[in-house]
Image (spheres, rainbow, N blue to C red):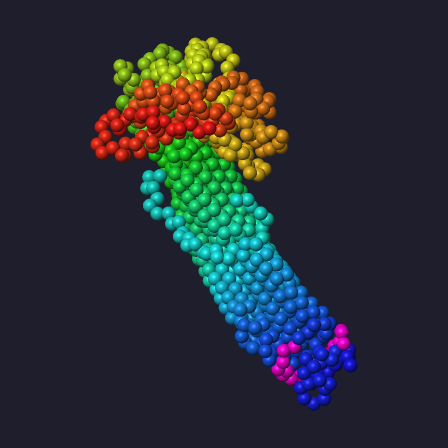
Amino acid sequence: MKRNALRVADRGWGTHRTVTAAVRAADEGAVIHVQPGDYRESVVLDRDITLIAEKGPGTVRVVAAHGPAITVRGGTCELRDLTAEGTAGREPAVLVRGGRAVLDHCAVSGGRVEIGRGTAELRTCTVENAEGSGVLVTGTAQVVVEDCVIRSTAGHGLTLTDAARAEVRHTTVERATGCGIVLTGESQGTFDACTVRHVGDAGLLAQPRSRPLLRDCRLHDIGTQGVRSADGASAAAVTPAAEEGEHAAAAERGAPRTRLETCEIFRTGGEGVLAGDAARLRMDDCQIRETGGAGVIAAGTGHVEMERVRVVDVPGTGLAVLEDAELRVRGGTVARTGANGLHATDRCTVRLTECEIATTAYTALHVAGSVRAELRSCTVRDSAQHAVHVEGAADFTAEDTRIERARMAGVDVKDADAVLRGLVVADTETGIRLDSRHRPLLADCEVLRPARTGVEIAAGTSALLVGGRIEGSGSAGVFLDERSEAWIEDLTVSDSQGSGLVIWAGARPRVRSVTIAGTTKNGVYAGDGSGGLLEDCTISATGYPAVYVGSKASPLLRRCLVRDTDEDLSQADDAAARFEQCRTSGVTASTLPTADAGAAAGPLHAAGTAGAPATGPGTAVAVREGTGEDRLPELLAELGDLVGLESVKREVESMAKLMQLVKRRQEAGLQPPPLSRHLVFAGNPGTGKTTVARLYGRLLAALGLLTDGHLVEADRGALVGEYVGHTAPRTTAVFKRALGGVLFIDEAYSLVPAGQSTDFGQEAISTLVKLMEDHRDDVVVIAAGYPQDMERLIDSNPGLASRFTRTLRFDDYSSQDLVRIVEHQAARHEYRIGDDTAAALLDHFGSIARTERFGNGRTARQVFQQMTEQHAMRVADLSDPDADDLTVLLPVDVPAAVS
């Protein structure tokens, strides 16, 4: 007969001697009271039953006879105050295979709690001395764990696999030989106010597709990483970048899967957090400290987002980003690191916003490889080496950031490209040092109280300095090393202990609207053999002569003002400086040729030119820069030598002559005719647009209408940002690099994708229009692309239509043109092509379908390469080839046409 209340006792008074017997006799929903004692049996529950230890926790032990001590197969089964002991093997002590199991104030030892199907609740329980895992949840099972302790396991503490789900609250996992918490497969778990401590491996191990959420958790005294996201991710060795030998003179990103909120990670044997391949990890309001390695490592293709996270007191690097990983940090703090604050290398992407990097033993931010790094509204202070060091092929942007108290440079750029905007660099050894084959940009930056140079432009480096100020330098305000080419505009240099602006041998800067005041030495020091242009500058209150010009130096000073100083000019005997419309005021001893003096003297030969009389200090000279117009015939001949493009060549030559006339009218004081130098190049790929653009820039430079004539190539990817507010600075940076030359925008129509009126490309166009107006005399913009798409681009913005009034159409090359291109290539590489081979080439090009994949000149160059490869294979079989064999390309070398 079944009963609703049963009593079990192993001796003395009781209805049943075993729990199993009572279960068999119980009705559905029965309550079984178990008297104190040890019950050696394996209990199976398959319907609604409640088992209660009559005298409370620790009085009833169910010890497995074989297999699990308790198995739940169905129904709702509640266990209160019981102790379940396994056989100390790999079998579970409690196994849930179905139904719903509730363990309340229970203790489990000698085996794990395993939930394979159904649901389970563990409340105020202890699980210890298990093997493999303390709690294992698999399949589609679901579990709630609250106010529990999982400890002393020979393996992991809590493991979720497959599609398991868990809610874990106020639970401690401790003294596990493996990881504290493990999630694999597509499992999900929420962990609130939990503690993981004294475990042998990671505090949390989360494989790529799992989704753990930790809130208010503490992970400490961990054997390896506090959190390891993505199984198999290894902590790649991060060697901190110690800067030595300082220059003595100068994939689709999904939502985060692993999430930590208001958590603490400390006293780890390895990294605080390691995110490896395919990891998607986010941390909010967390703290990482006292780690055994780096604070956070993102590696492989890992993606890490951090907001208001503190990484402090770590012996290695604070944040390390490697390989193809991505790290985004907002409002974070990295402080008191034993190596770098940030170490980014390989091909990774880093964005730091409103962060503080402080008190680092090595360089605070070390960026290398092909990294793209952005620093916005950050503070970097108290670095034992550089505050920021960027090298290799990295692309670095810093905006609205304050840098203080670095023992070496505030920003040191070596070979990389950099855009620095709105920086304040204070109390560093050197303010900013640029040594790059690119054209770094400094816009509206302030350099305050550097112990040495404020801004140093290294040998052979081109750079743009626009706006900003340099104050209180220990030596030079700006140092331009030999052969450097800097464009400096609207800059203020004050209170330098050395000279304000130093131009070294061979340097050729362009300096406009710069103010230099209160220098201990010269305002401008133009060293031996230097040159350049300084216009609309003001120099005052200098300790030495305001301007010094060294031996054979030939700077041009135009419309400059020197005031309130003892002496305005000192020159070497063989200096070749030139002065135009300069003025002085309040100068005690003045020898600087002024506008009045120049006019009185009349036109003279430029100092130092061939056949000119020797000129000494103070000689007034006529204001006519060498324009290079004598190069026009050479450049026009080079244009004429281009294959095909007859109408384009006629138009370019006509524009060159028109601009030559414009320049002469300006020199004669006449108004120039209306003229727009900006152009649209409409043509298919491979029709010579880039080649003509480069020649056009050189022609304008020869006419003196551009200072350099260099070509800067850009496309949509270079101009358009990835998020709101990113496009305008990016477009401006590219535009600034083109100042003095030509900005060539290939596939320009892609800035206005068809049917996407809200695309970021519109912002790029608006920015370009404004910059073209602000710098109308300093740059030429050429927009290039398919003929049918360029009209859509011009019609997208009224400002474009008014500035691009001329379109040059680049027709496809004819077959005869393509043969001539191959012949040019052959002559350049010392091959010969006979008439029969030329005829075979003509037939070959005539047979090629002119589809959208046809590459014009590119196709011709590919054909030439195929011919040389075929020729090499043919000649390799000859035992003793002669000169003709080695140089003559035959008809058999022409590739077969592909239909």
Total marks placed: 0
Q: Relative to 663, does residue 305 appear above or below in the rendering?
A: below
- Residue 454 seen by the camera: no
Q: Relative to 837, does residue 226 appear above or below in the rendering?
A: below
Image location (x, y in percent) of residue 444: 49, 34
Look at 54% across and 57% down and name the residue there: 207
Image location (x, y in percent) of residue 776: 50, 21
- Name the foreground residue: 534 vs 24: 24
Q: In this view, does 732 lie to the left or right of 165?
A: left
What predominant SS class does the magenta segment belong to? strand
Image location (x, y in percent) of residue 196: 55, 65
The quadrant holding residue 429 is top left
Look at 47% across and 37% down and name the residue there: 420
Look at 59% across and 66% down and name the residue there: 136
Q: In the rendered structure, which segment of residues is drawn in magenta?
A: 27-43
The answer to whether residue 42 is magenta is yes
Look at 40% across and 42% down and name the residue there: 391
The quadrant holding residue 183 is bottom right
Image location (x, y in percent) of residue 195: 58, 64
Q: Which residue lies furthest to the bottom in this view?
A: 12
The answer to whether residue 295 is magenta is no
- Name the foreground residue: 247 vs 164: 164
- Residue 807 seen by the camera: yes
Q: In which quarter of the image is the N terminus?
A: bottom right
Q: Relative to 858, does residue 180 appear above or below in the rendering?
A: below
